[in-house]
Amino acid sequence: MGENDLVEPSSPASPVPSDHLGGLATVLDLVRGGAARTRPELSRLSGFGRTVITQRVGELTGCGLLEEDRLGPSSGGRAPRELRFRAEAGVVLAAELGATSIATAATDLTGRVLASREEPGDVALGPEVVLDRVEELFGELLDELDGGAPVWGIGVGLPGPVEFATGRPSAPPIMPGWDRYPVRDRLAARYRAPVWVDNEVNAMALGELRAGAARGQQDIIYIKIGTGIGAGLVSGGRLHRGSQGCAGDIGHAAVADDPVVVCRCGNTGCLEAFAGGAALARDGATAAKEGRSEFLASRLAERGTLTAADLSIAAQSGDRTSVELLTQAGRLVGSLLATLVSFYNPALVIVGGGVSGAGDLLLATLRETVYRRSLPLATRELRIARSTLGDEAGLVGAAFMVIDELFAPERLAHWIDTGSPAGRPALAELPR
């Protein structure tokens, strides 16, 4: 697929004057976010006069983004008519690809999941096979929704570094055949909608920020401990991707000098090679074969393989070897996280991913290490909590990635006149 498939040119200049756009975006955001539901509330929170509010509301209802709702409570005079954001006007498709799973969802324009699908998958099969299946699952979701609202945008989270500006993976260690693959171009041509692609951990962080444990927070670190390890950074209430999009890739930070343990990226000493889910499973299997854990040996003989969850179950049953392995992993992750906490000074650290949900021992060790090794000022009001969205964090975040981008004033200006960004894939190419 070539870049000529995207035939819609991006407009060189905004079709809506910036001063006018500011008022529209402000009013829309206040209603969309639930801060204001009536015209008097909009006037009070925005600082705009009654005439300006009436004009902007009229334009937004005229293009189908807002609509009149029920009467609100009266403050002494005539009861004001409430306004409602038409979240059902469009559908957002979201996909989160893990190393061994595919999850997809269709959401409304507030990020509420309307339908979802999840199944095992192997990202190493390559982009053609995997994205073929993603498109099949998208088709099932749209069929379930009975083809009502148009697709406004698509968000995809991938388990590797992504150049956010182009939507292309960049030398992903566990994704053979994906390097520089035009994920955005393919899906944009297929659905005629704007597409954004990001690292799955960034999507998870955004999901928690918009709809999970980090709602209302400004400075957070989301750390995923799964097959691999990564971090998502939120600064000032916005996701921090860095200049190329790879900020937070802590899984390949060096934590040891051991030349024997080789990471999937080809280097030695990487954090995920010692503390990720695959590393825990590997070390548990070694312990089982060497006779250091009867529990793990029995589990391995029964199932033929081990996972990090097996180590957690073994640890809860009093297996000393599993306790040691989980404790060691918690200390390694905690030590690196302690450096980040002192350097970045977040108010909240959220721990997610498959390994984080396997039990309390690893999380407790991680907490103890961070509080012991970080600067006292950095941990004085720091909270370290488990993800509240769990497995849905990446999907919800991928949907909000699209929603945030579509309603950014720089892009809103290019589609608000028609009331829909559907059919405009080149919107994703516009700079913010």
Image (cartoon, helix red, strand yellow):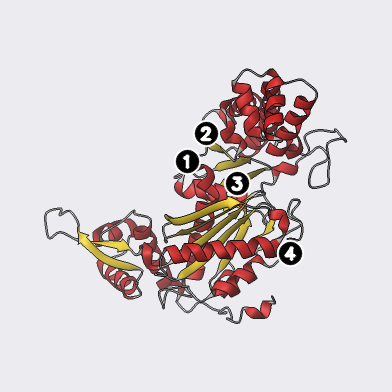
Side (left or right) of 159 relative to 110: right
Q: Earlier in the sequence, mark 3 or mark 2?
A: 3
Image point (47%, 69%), residue name: 151
Disc 4 residue type (three-letter): Arg
Q: CA distance from mark 1 to mark 3?
A: 14 Å
Q: CA distance from mark 4 to mark 2?
A: 35 Å
* Label 2 secondary element: strand
Q: Earlier in the sequence, mark 3 or mark 4?
A: 4
At which x and y percent is residue 70? 20, 60
Q: For this rendering, which residue is in front, 214 or 225?
A: 225
* Label 4 secondary element: loop
Disc 2 residue type (three-letter): Ala
Image point (63%, 67%), residue name: 184
Q: Earlier in the sequence, mark 1 or mark 4?
A: 4
Vertically, is 203 above or below 20? Answer: above
Q: Earlier in the sequence, mark 2 or mark 1?
A: 1
Image point (43%, 63%), residue name: 144
Vertically, is 284 above or below 171? Answer: above
Q: CA distance from mark 1 to mark 4?
A: 34 Å
> Tag on residue 233?
3
Quadrant of the drawing holding the C terminus: bottom right
Q: Earlier in the sequence, mark 1 or mark 3?
A: 1
Identify the residue position indicated by label 2 in the image. 385
At which x and y percent is residue 259? 88, 36
Q: CA distance from mark 3 to mark 2?
A: 15 Å
* Label 1 secondary element: loop
Residue 57 appearing in the image:
yes
* Label 3 secondary element: strand
Q: Are marks 2 and 1 in contact (CB under 8 Å)?
A: yes
